[in-house]
Image: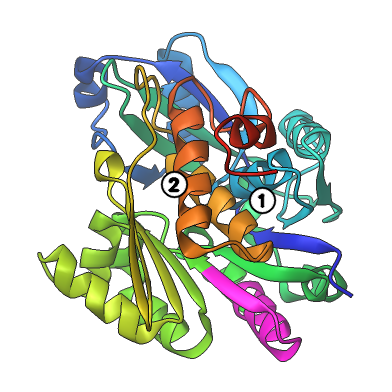
Amino acid sequence: MQDHDVVAIGNAIVDIIGRCDDAFLAAHGRVKGSMQLVDAPTVERLYGAMGPGIEISGGSAANTAAGVASFGGKAGFIGKVASDQFGQVFRHDIRAAGVTFDTPPGGGDPTGRSLILVTPDGQRTMNTFLGVSTHLGSGEVDAQLIRSARILYLEGYLFDRPEAKAAFRQAADIAANAGRQVALSLSDPFCVDRHRAEFLELVHKSVDILFANEAEVTSLYETHSFGAAAERARADTRLSALTRSEKGSVILSSGEAVEVPAAPVERVVDTTGAGDLYAAGFLFGVAHGMSLEAAGRLGSLAAAEIISHIGARPQVPLAELARKEGLMA
């Protein structure tokens, strides 16, 4: 029985989003536009130094699940939070978005947080304290939930700690054995640099749908040529959706190459979650049997909505926007 379109597995993180200038990043040794893992003292120090912030449940794969639900799809999420205030924020937000979330809370470390510093040009610099999110173990992977979904979506960020890798691979095996599609997001070029060999092994062995931006896919295949990296991705997967910011996206299958333009945006406010929401639209389209071009256009639409405001969760129902644009009935 397939009663979910997408089940996502990843780090359960509460985003704390605030504005800063380039000088603040430099003063605190942050690499603009990157995701850096930080420890508890660092996240507390940055939290104390940054200005007012908006707190909302985030995490890459969780954002994608919320996006699928906003399109009117059925989504689930597997990820670990603690029994603390941030854990309550996460659990409330993701369930309120219409996403199935039943992973039991854990003890020990606190709920993960990501301090997202947004500069005036809309670039976001993420400083992520993973906390208890990496404690997701193989015994907590909900096999029944994974089997209930057409597509399992895996977040590359989860590879940053060895404790979660067994759960990640177990989920992929459960999905494959049930005849479901497995999708992987490479998440971040720094993440790819750390785990290139393991990502390539996973792509070759288990991945049906690969999501990556230009920097991530060229890092994966260790080339400066997007075209060369794209052809490698096409050879390695059944389907690759490669995003190129304002240039739109390229979707590759063995017999088809589709270029999808970026949806217009009046003003880029915050790029946080653009890739996550592109994946949401694309996965919703694939799960509902749409053409690759139509799925890509849903992805572009969702990404455009998310970068037009602060935060990585849609502010208006994506299904409503899609109907206005004639992309959904």
Secondary structure mostly seen in magenta is helix
Badge 1 amino acid: Val
On the rendered image, what quadrant is the N terminus found in? bottom right
Nearer to the camera, 189 or 46 = 189
Picture residue at 67% right of the left edge, 69% below the top: 151
- Determine which of the numbered discs, if any, sits on residue 275 in the image: 2
User: Which corner quadrant of the image does residue 320 belong to?
Assistant: top right
Nearer to the camera, 249 or 25 = 249
Q: What element carries label 1?
A: helix
Nearer to the camera, 233 or 198 = 233
Badge 2 amino acid: Gly
In the rendered image, is residue 53 in sight? yes
Residue that badge 1 annotates:
132
Q: Give the range drawn in magenta.
A: 167-183
- Estimate the x, y position of residue 145 in percent, counting from the top left: 83, 68
- Determine which of the numbered discs, if any, sits on residue 62 in the image: none
On the rendered image, what quadrant is the C terminus found in? top right
Spatial distance from mark 2 to mark 1, Cα to Cα? 24 Å
How crowded pointer 2 is (Cα within 10 Å; few <14, some 14-19, many 20+) is rated as many
